[in-house]
Image (cartoon, helix red, strand yellow):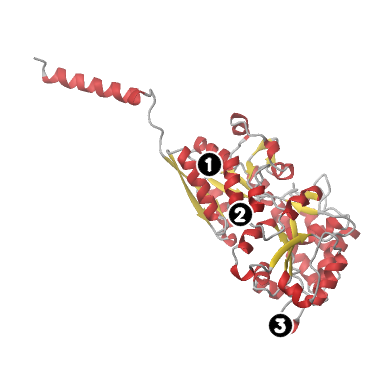
């Protein structure tokens, strides 16, 4: 008969063997971890949760919590979190904020992940993927991409007996149409002319034959003849009274005025398609056309990148999640739900099919004449000066030439610090 001590040792040994064998697999069960994923869009949050759920199915040891912050809080919260060690594990990044985080060592380097996961960077628009490369390292994978068009209200055009915008439209056509569409008695304006770089004056400066920043990233071009012409396109609309004033556009955003059918034309990106599609009041009333041409056709292009926090407690799991976000399945979910135009090549058709009431191919065709969104130096700093220096020109308090020169000088000072 075996002693109690012998039985105890035998049981312990059996338990140890069972633990080491992992039930026959030879490895311990993966540690369960939770990752956070931050974004700024309530419209896109459902799709982001669907993408997270798909990832969790393939990786049952990893839970992803999607966090949606208001745009007005997003960047300040991210900045404080990155500096204090409490940033989300994964988060959306924009090109004009990217370099400050990359330089500060706050972004997870994905260069090795791209190699190990066999990610072909050629599947993304080069202008977007290049925006998230710093000193030869990749710090974010493109999620989507944007070009610009003219969103317009067909009902307002019909009421004013104005022909819809098309690819033959010039700057002059916009001004003429805006005058006919403006009905002050009904509180309707022909066009929205805010101080908007991405949807507005960057495009018109390029269309006038100018550039935003020189190729070396050392000087801006706002005070050049082309720069002034591109700015005057918008200030002339303000002066003609065919746009809400800056004060009115401050009280109510241009996109909201368009949705409220108080503005007939709104120059902006592909990212509004999903919101307009879901607005029942706009059903059958809205479409989109190419941007008008000046001396030439042009639009800026950019896109959101999915980035990771360098201080994460779970770098390997985070890299796996970011690779999934940059892959075909995540792109397909974004496209099929109509959420946004995905960056991954070959996955855009379901996005077009999801909202057939809009001529969304306008945004894809615009890639041919697109120019990368400028990100030289501390882009968020110098771009943040636009309203301060350009508002007097928009309000008619200063000549455009003077405001443009003052803005250019301020931008160049920032660029000189890089």
Q: CA distance from mark 2 to mark 3?
A: 33 Å
Residue 85, can we see it?
A: no
Front residue of 326 and 350: 350
At label 2, counting other C-alpha atoms closer than 10 Å, the crowd grade (few under 14, some 14-19, many 20 or more) is many
Quote the CA–CA distance across marks 1 and 3. Answer: 54 Å
Front residue of 53/16: it is 53
> Which label was assigned to residue 186?
3
Q: Nearer the viewer, mark 2 or mark 3?
A: 2
Depicted 104 relative to depicted 183: above or below = above
Q: Earlier in the sequence, mark 1 or mark 2?
A: 1
Residue farthest toward the bottom in the current orientation of the protein: 185
Q: Position of residue 415 (x, y in %)?
A: 77, 50
Q: Image check: 209 left or right of 414?
A: right
SS class of the residue under badge 2?
loop
Looking at marks 1 and 3 on the same chain, the residue that comes earlier in the sequence is marked by: 3
Q: Quadrant of the N terminus?
A: top left
Foreground of the two, 181 or 403:
181
Mark on residue 311?
1
* Residue 156 occupies quadrant: bottom right
Could you tell me which secondary element the residue under label 3 belongs to?
Answer: helix
Q: Nearer the viewer, residue 151 or 98?
A: 151
Q: Specify the farthest residue to the left.
A: 1
Report helix, strand or loop for mark 1: loop
Q: Residue beneath label 2, please? A: 338
């Amino acid at each position: 008969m075996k002693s109690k001590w012998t039985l105890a040792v035998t049981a312990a040994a059996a338990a140890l063997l069972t633990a080491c064998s992992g039930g026959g697999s030879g490895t311990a069960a993966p540690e369960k971890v939770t990752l956070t994923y931050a974004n700024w869009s309530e419209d896109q949050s459902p799709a982001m949760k669907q993408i997270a759920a798909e990832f969790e199915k393939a990786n049952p040891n990893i839970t992803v919590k999607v966090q949606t912050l208001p745009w007005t809080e997003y960047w300040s919260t991210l900045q404080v979190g990155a500096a204090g060690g409490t940033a989300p594990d994964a988060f959306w990044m924009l090109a004009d904020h990217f370099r400050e985080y990359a330089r500060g060592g706050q972004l997870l380097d994905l260069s090795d992940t791209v190699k190990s996961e066999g990610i072909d960077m050629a599947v993304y628009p080069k202008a977007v993927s290049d925006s998230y490369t710093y000193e030869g390292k990749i710090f974010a994978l493109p999620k989507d991409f944007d070009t610009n068009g003219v969103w317009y209200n067909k009902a307002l055009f019909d009421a004013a007996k104005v022909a819809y915008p098309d690819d033959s439209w010039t700057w002059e056509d916009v001004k003429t149409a805006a005058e006919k569409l403006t009905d002050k008695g009904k509180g309707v304006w022909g066009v929205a002319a805010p101080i908007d770089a991405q949807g507005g004056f960057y495009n018109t400066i390029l269309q006038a034959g100018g550039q935003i920043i020189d190729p070396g990233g050392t000087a801006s071009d706002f005070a050049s003849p082309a720069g002034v012409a591109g700015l005057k396109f918008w200030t002339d609309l303000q002066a003609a009274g065919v746009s809400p004033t800056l004060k009115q556009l401050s009280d109510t955003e241009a996109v909201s005025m368009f949705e409220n059918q108080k503005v007939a034309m709104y120059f902006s990106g592909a990212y509004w398609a999903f919101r307009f599609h879901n607005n029942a009041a706009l059903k059958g009333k809205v479409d989109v056309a190419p941007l008008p041409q000046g001396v030439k056709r042009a639009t800026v292009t950019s896109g959101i990148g999915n980035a990771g926090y360098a201080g994460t407690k779970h770098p390997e799991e985070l890299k796996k999640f970011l690779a999934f976000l940059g892959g075909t399945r995540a792109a397909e979910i974004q496209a099929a739900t109509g959420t946004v135009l995905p960056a991954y090549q070959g996955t855009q058709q379901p996005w077009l099919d999801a909202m057939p009431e809009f001529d969304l191919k306008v945004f894809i065709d615009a890639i041919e004449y697109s120019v990368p969104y400028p990100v030289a130096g501390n882009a968020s700093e110098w771009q943040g000066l636009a309203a301060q220096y350009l508002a007097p020109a928009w309000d008619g308090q200063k000549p455009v030439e003077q405001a443009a020169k003052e803005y250019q000088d301020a931008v160049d000072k920032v660029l000189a610090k890089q």
